[in-house]
Amino acid sequence: MDGDFRTGFVRESGGARHPALVLNADYRPLSYLPLSLWSWQAAVKAVFLDRVAVLAEYDAELRSPSLSMRIPSVVVLKRYIRPPRRVAFTRFNLFLRDEFRCQYCGARTDLTFDHVVPRALGGRTTWENVVAACAPCNLKKGARPLHRSGLRLRRAPRRPGAEELRNLGRRFPPGYLHESWVDFLYWDSELEA
């Protein structure tokens, strides 16, 4: 990945908000989209319960009469959590599979979903029959079969694998990334020479 792409999304934390990036025991985020984050309170609690190890910290400190510690920025679980093998059929996962693009025209705005074989003609609500569509294309297609609508699919709909969706999630960074997270989010990207 291009270095400018990765660091272009780095933002400074605002106010007292200091979320912690949560990594599985294999040092990969539990999820990329949404990014696996805990509040600073949950991260500190997990540290005290010895459920995580701290890999990076914010400059901010927590202070009590008997303790002073820096707020965790990146934590890794001590026990591995097996990622789910099946992908839930949700609107969000459907949009992620289709990379947040209309599967007819490629638009990225005003997305909804469309049954390739309309329900009125016996089409089912399954991975193999539902695609992301912008409102204008969805309206144009209506309850007609695809071949009568004048539209063409950019690619055939199919059931995605869990690893495929995790990898797709990496391509859509959130609006906020702390600089200490970048190396852990892109740990398998190619290094510059």
Image (spheres, rainbow, N blue to C red):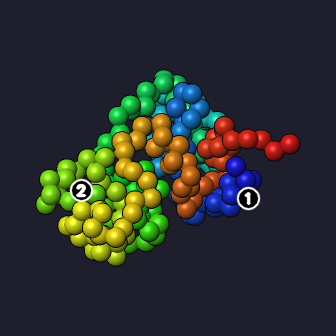
In the image, what residue occupies the spot 53% across and 39% down?
A: 29
Q: Secondary structure at mark 1?
A: helix
Does residue 60 lie above or below 29 as drawn?
Answer: below
Q: Residue 122 location in percent, x, y?
A: 14, 53
- The outermost residue toward the top is 79
> What residue is shown at x 45% (from left), y 59% (from top)?
154
**Of 65 and 97, which appears nearest the observer?**
97
Task: Name the foreground residue: 183 vs 75.
Answer: 183
Measured from the top left, where is residue 146 in percent x and y?
29, 62
Q: Quadrant of the C terminus?
A: top right
Q: Which dot marks residue 117?
A: 2
Q: Is residue 70 among the parts visible in the rendering?
A: no
Count neighbours of disc 1 (C-alpha within 10 A) and say few if under 14, some if 14 to 19, many if 20 or more. few
**The image quarter in which residue 159 lies:** top left
Left or right placement of residue 161 versus residue 56 in this view: left
Q: In the picture shown, does residue 180 fall above or below 102?
A: above
Query: Image height check: is 92 above or below 189?
Result: below
Q: Which residue position holds label 1?
A: 4
Residue 95 in the image, given as x and y percentages of width and height: 39, 56
